[in-house]
Amino acid sequence: MSYSYSPTCYSSGIASHCGTSTRAVAKALGMEFTEVEGCNCCGSPLYGKASDLEALCFAARNLALIQRSGNDMVTSCSFCYITLNWANATLSRDEELRGKVSEVLSAINLDYPEDGVRVRHLLEVLINDTTCDTVSTVVKRRLKGLRIAPYYGPHITSLGYGFDAPESLIFLDQVIEALGGEVVPLPKSKTQWCGDSPLLTCEEERALTSMLKVLEEAETNGAQVIVAPCPLAQTNLDIYQPRINGIYGKGFHLPVLLLTQIMGVAFGISPSSLDLDKNVVSPYKTLSPYLSTWDER
Amino acid sequence: MIREAMLVMGGYFNPFRVWGIIPLWIKLFVHRRLPLIPTRIEGREEIGAIRARIKEMEG
């Protein structure tokens, strides 16, 4: 199937391993991505900092660019997912605001698409379009015996676009099972706040406490790896582990992988094509039995 | 544009935290996730035009 794809600011910057691994996995699954050039930040950092109109215009510019390709948009960033869906929903019910946004976009010769653009999360697409059966047929090395904790993060469920039903919170579990991995549930912390934008948050203590809960539950339940579908959640749990260890006197060394990275490992994609070396907590030792080419970095 | 980006950042960034997050920056740099020279954001001119138009409309 064909989709529009924009790596977004995050997946082409600080979490570029997300963009790399998403493209590699999509190719292995036969998903056709039409890359949308020129997208800006989705507007999520503007929540509460600027007018709704400004945030909406940022999101609407992206939606107008995506519309040109004529496909549904797929994103693996949960922040983009909720922001673009929020923009679609707000503009479809508020005619006055939609008029203002159209007026602003006309200044750069773009039109907000009248019916919006369908924005979908990669995880939802994997379950509903690709299906877990297809995923398992692409697996070359089953992750047998690997205990994986699925961490959903707070965003994909916060607005209820495709993830509104509680049963959606087994999507990640289903993909892990399709890869042959052993699911280690995180009943208390699977939607725990991840701290949002790393390096910028003013609420560090709250963010660290929240991440501590996820790491503690994963370790207590015997997980060897945490898997997150969102680059923000993955990055936070990964890069903040040494800081959490320092502040709270812990000794976490738990690799946190993107969903697309763990899928790529099972698909036999080389570690360098999944940018595994960009993970701060090295996953190489834990994943060594499953890697197609062992290249310790 | 730089001034506007700084304003947005200013809403989030806590200067007192800089010391504490230097090790994080170093880790990200070592893992090739932070470039030495920041790349320019996509669509800068268009974003500038959007903000200028909004300013006009909002008076």
Image (cartoon, grey):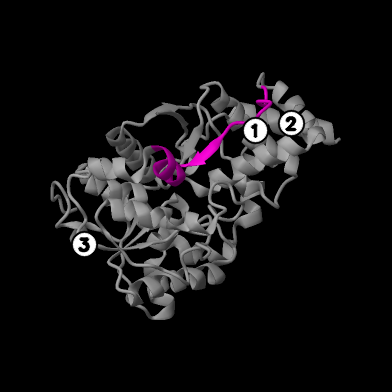
Q: Name the residue carrying label 2.
A: A101
Q: Name the residue carrying label 1.
A: A60
As for residue A115 lying within the magenta part, the answer is yes
Mark 1–mark 3 distance (CA, rounded to whole Å): 42 Å
Q: Name the residue carrying label 3.
A: A286
Q: Residues within 10 Å of mark 3 (few under 14, many from 20)?
A: some
Furthest-bottom residue in this view:
A249
Residue in the foreground of this view, choosing between A217 and A274: A217
Instruction: Inspect the image, locate mark 2, and give the three-letter code of the amino acid beneath it.
Output: Val
Q: Are marks 1 and 2 on the same chain?
A: yes
Q: Residues within 10 Å of mark 1 (few under 14, many from 20)?
A: many
Mark 2–mark 3 distance (CA, rounded to whole Å): 49 Å
The magenta segment is A111-129
Q: Residue at x 57, y 53 (%)?
A: A164
Instruction: Inspect the image, locate mark 1, and give the three-letter code of the amino acid beneath it.
Output: Ala
Asked if labels 2 and 1 touch by Cβ distance under 8 angstroms, the answer is yes
Classify residue A245 by image quadrant: bottom left
**Image quarter in which the N terminus of chain A is found:** top left
Instruction: Inspect the image, locate mark 3, and give the three-letter code of the amino acid beneath it.
Output: Thr
Residue in the foreground of this view, choosing between A115 and A246: A115
Question: Residue A157, labelled with which disc?
Answer: none
